[in-house]
Amino acid sequence: MGNAISLPKELEHLVDSLHMSNGLTSIFIEVLAINGSLLAKTNREKELIIWLAQRDQAIVGAGNVGFDIDEMPWTIDYFESEKGFILRAISNAMDGLGWERLSYEPRKDWVIGCLEKFRQMISAFDKEYVKSNNYLVWTEIEVDDDYPTIPVGYSKCETHGIYLSCHRCILCNNII
Ligand SMILES: [Zn+2]
Protein backbone atom coordinates (compact mmCIF):
# COMPACT_ATOMS: atom_id res chain seq x y z
CA MET A 1 0.00 0.00 0.00
CA GLY A 2 2.71 2.46 0.89
CA ASN A 3 2.45 5.75 2.74
CA ALA A 4 1.36 9.26 1.77
CA ILE A 5 2.48 12.61 3.13
CA SER A 6 0.15 15.54 2.38
CA LEU A 7 -0.27 19.23 2.95
CA PRO A 8 -3.49 20.38 4.65
CA LYS A 9 -6.42 20.46 2.20
CA GLU A 10 -6.24 24.26 1.78
CA LEU A 11 -2.65 23.99 0.50
CA GLU A 12 -2.87 20.78 -1.54
CA HIS A 13 -3.14 22.75 -4.77
CA LEU A 14 0.42 24.04 -4.21
CA VAL A 15 2.10 20.63 -3.93
CA ASP A 16 0.18 17.38 -4.29
CA SER A 17 0.69 14.42 -1.96
CA LEU A 18 3.93 12.47 -1.77
CA HIS A 19 3.30 8.74 -2.22
CA MET A 20 6.05 6.27 -1.31
CA SER A 21 6.36 2.50 -1.10
CA ASN A 22 6.91 1.14 2.40
CA GLY A 23 10.60 0.53 1.73
CA LEU A 24 11.15 3.99 0.31
CA THR A 25 9.33 5.53 3.28
CA SER A 26 11.72 3.80 5.70
CA ILE A 27 14.79 5.19 3.96
CA PHE A 28 13.17 8.65 3.71
CA ILE A 29 12.41 8.77 7.46
CA GLU A 30 15.80 7.30 8.38
CA VAL A 31 17.91 9.82 6.45
CA LEU A 32 15.82 12.66 7.93
CA ALA A 33 16.25 11.22 11.44
CA ILE A 34 20.01 10.96 10.91
CA ASN A 35 20.38 14.50 9.61
CA GLY A 36 17.93 16.02 12.07
CA SER A 37 19.84 14.38 14.92
CA LEU A 38 23.11 15.83 13.61
CA LEU A 39 21.60 19.34 13.40
CA ALA A 40 19.18 19.62 16.34
CA LYS A 41 20.16 22.02 19.09
CA THR A 42 16.92 23.10 20.77
CA ASN A 43 14.46 20.79 22.48
CA ARG A 44 11.76 21.68 19.92
CA GLU A 45 14.11 20.61 17.10
CA LYS A 46 14.93 17.34 18.86
CA GLU A 47 11.21 16.72 19.38
CA LEU A 48 10.39 17.20 15.69
CA ILE A 49 12.95 14.50 14.87
CA ILE A 50 11.68 12.19 17.61
CA TRP A 51 8.18 12.58 16.16
CA LEU A 52 9.44 11.65 12.68
CA ALA A 53 11.42 8.70 14.09
CA GLN A 54 8.22 7.40 15.71
CA ARG A 55 6.99 6.72 12.19
CA ASP A 56 8.82 3.39 12.47
CA GLN A 57 7.21 0.72 10.31
CA ALA A 58 9.18 -2.08 12.02
CA ILE A 59 7.11 -1.30 15.15
CA VAL A 60 3.83 0.30 14.05
CA GLY A 61 3.40 -1.73 10.87
CA ALA A 62 4.16 -1.28 7.18
CA GLY A 63 1.97 1.30 5.47
CA ASN A 64 0.90 2.92 8.78
CA VAL A 65 3.17 5.93 8.90
CA GLY A 66 1.74 8.44 6.41
CA PHE A 67 0.88 11.87 7.81
CA ASP A 68 -0.28 15.39 7.00
CA ILE A 69 2.24 18.18 7.47
CA ASP A 70 -0.02 19.89 10.02
CA GLU A 71 0.08 16.78 12.23
CA MET A 72 3.74 17.43 12.97
CA PRO A 73 4.37 18.93 16.43
CA TRP A 74 5.02 22.51 15.26
CA THR A 75 4.72 25.31 17.79
CA ILE A 76 3.35 28.76 16.92
CA ASP A 77 6.05 30.64 18.83
CA TYR A 78 8.98 28.90 17.19
CA PHE A 79 7.42 27.95 13.87
CA GLU A 80 9.81 29.85 11.59
CA SER A 81 12.91 28.40 13.25
CA GLU A 82 11.36 24.92 13.31
CA LYS A 83 10.56 25.18 9.61
CA GLY A 84 14.10 26.38 8.87
CA PHE A 85 15.49 23.46 10.86
CA ILE A 86 13.46 20.85 8.93
CA LEU A 87 14.47 22.47 5.62
CA ARG A 88 18.16 22.27 6.62
CA ALA A 89 17.77 18.61 7.61
CA ILE A 90 16.14 17.86 4.23
CA SER A 91 18.85 19.76 2.37
CA ASN A 92 21.66 17.90 4.15
CA ALA A 93 19.94 14.57 3.50
CA MET A 94 19.67 15.49 -0.19
CA ASP A 95 23.41 16.26 -0.16
CA GLY A 96 24.02 12.69 1.02
CA LEU A 97 25.12 13.47 4.57
CA GLY A 98 25.01 10.55 7.01
CA TRP A 99 23.81 7.96 4.51
CA GLU A 100 26.77 5.75 5.43
CA ARG A 101 25.00 5.07 8.75
CA LEU A 102 22.34 3.02 6.93
CA SER A 103 22.94 -0.72 7.00
CA TYR A 104 22.01 -1.02 3.31
CA GLU A 105 22.62 0.70 -0.03
CA PRO A 106 19.45 2.57 -0.99
CA ARG A 107 18.39 3.81 -4.43
CA LYS A 108 19.57 7.35 -3.74
CA ASP A 109 17.91 8.99 -6.73
CA TRP A 110 14.45 7.74 -5.68
CA VAL A 111 14.86 8.99 -2.13
CA ILE A 112 16.25 12.35 -3.25
CA GLY A 113 13.20 12.86 -5.49
CA CYS A 114 10.95 12.28 -2.46
CA LEU A 115 13.04 14.59 -0.28
CA GLU A 116 12.75 17.32 -2.91
CA LYS A 117 8.97 17.01 -2.90
CA PHE A 118 8.91 17.06 0.91
CA ARG A 119 11.08 20.21 0.79
CA GLN A 120 8.51 21.86 -1.46
CA MET A 121 5.70 20.86 0.91
CA ILE A 122 7.45 22.20 4.02
CA SER A 123 8.32 25.41 2.13
CA ALA A 124 4.65 25.86 1.19
CA PHE A 125 3.40 25.13 4.72
CA ASP A 126 2.58 28.24 6.66
CA LYS A 127 2.23 29.23 10.31
CA GLU A 128 -1.48 29.92 9.96
CA TYR A 129 -2.08 26.19 9.43
CA VAL A 130 -0.21 25.11 12.58
CA LYS A 131 -2.50 23.26 14.99
CA SER A 132 -0.62 23.95 18.20
CA ASN A 133 -2.77 21.50 20.10
CA ASN A 134 -1.05 18.65 18.22
CA TYR A 135 2.22 19.42 19.99
CA LEU A 136 0.57 19.52 23.41
CA VAL A 137 -1.41 16.32 22.88
CA TRP A 138 1.62 14.49 21.50
CA THR A 139 3.91 15.41 24.40
CA GLU A 140 1.28 14.29 26.90
CA ILE A 141 0.72 10.83 25.45
CA GLU A 142 1.88 8.18 27.90
CA VAL A 143 2.77 5.19 25.73
CA ASP A 144 4.52 3.34 28.51
CA ASP A 145 6.23 4.45 31.74
CA ASP A 146 9.48 2.88 30.57
CA TYR A 147 9.22 4.31 27.06
CA PRO A 148 7.79 7.83 27.23
CA THR A 149 6.90 9.75 24.05
CA ILE A 150 9.98 11.90 24.54
CA PRO A 151 12.72 9.83 26.16
CA VAL A 152 14.09 11.53 29.28
CA GLY A 153 17.19 13.60 28.52
CA TYR A 154 16.75 13.29 24.73
CA SER A 155 18.97 10.23 24.61
CA LYS A 156 20.54 9.04 21.36
CA CYS A 157 21.37 5.58 20.04
CA GLU A 158 25.02 4.88 20.87
CA THR A 159 25.47 3.02 17.58
CA HIS A 160 23.69 5.36 15.18
CA GLY A 161 23.78 8.72 16.98
CA ILE A 162 20.10 9.42 16.37
CA TYR A 163 17.43 10.45 18.86
CA LEU A 164 15.51 7.60 20.42
CA SER A 165 11.71 7.63 20.30
CA CYS A 166 9.28 5.58 22.40
CA HIS A 167 10.10 2.81 19.90
CA ARG A 168 13.84 3.21 20.64
CA CYS A 169 16.18 3.52 17.61
CA ILE A 170 14.59 3.42 14.15
CA LEU A 171 17.86 2.22 12.59
CA CYS A 172 18.47 -0.56 15.13
CA ASN A 173 14.86 -1.72 14.63
CA ASN A 174 15.35 -1.94 10.88
CA ILE A 175 18.31 -4.35 11.00
CA ILE A 176 16.91 -7.68 9.88
ZN1 LIG B 1 20.56 2.50 16.60
Image: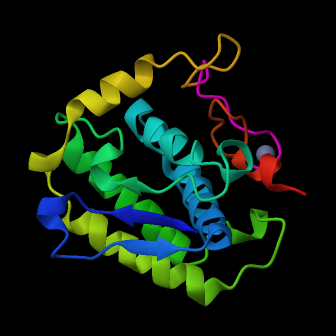
Answer left or right for 153 relative to 103. Answer: left
Q: Quadrant of the N terminus?
A: bottom right
Answer left or right for 88 relative to 14. Answer: right
Instruction: Name the image quarter holding residue 96.
Output: bottom right
Residues in magenta? 151-160
Q: Is residue 26 above or below residue 120?
A: above
- The residue at 59%/66% (across/down) is 25
- The residue at 83%/46% (across/down) is 159
Q: Nearer the viewer, residue 55 or 61?
A: 61
Q: Position of residue 123 (x, y in %)?
A: 24, 67
- The residue at 54%/25% (across/down) is 150
Q: Nearer the viewer, residue 131 or 32?
A: 131
**Is residue 6 a member of the stretch shown in magenta?**
no
Q: Position of residue 73 (x, y in %)?
A: 35, 38
Q: Is residue 80 above or below residue 111?
A: above
Q: Nearer the viewer, residue 173 or 80?
A: 173
- The residue at 15%/56% (across/down) is 126
**Is residue 159 a member of the stretch shown in magenta?**
yes
Tell me, yes or no, if residue 135 can be seen here.
yes
Answer left or right for 62 relative to 20. Answer: right
| Residue that sits furthest to the top in the current view | 145
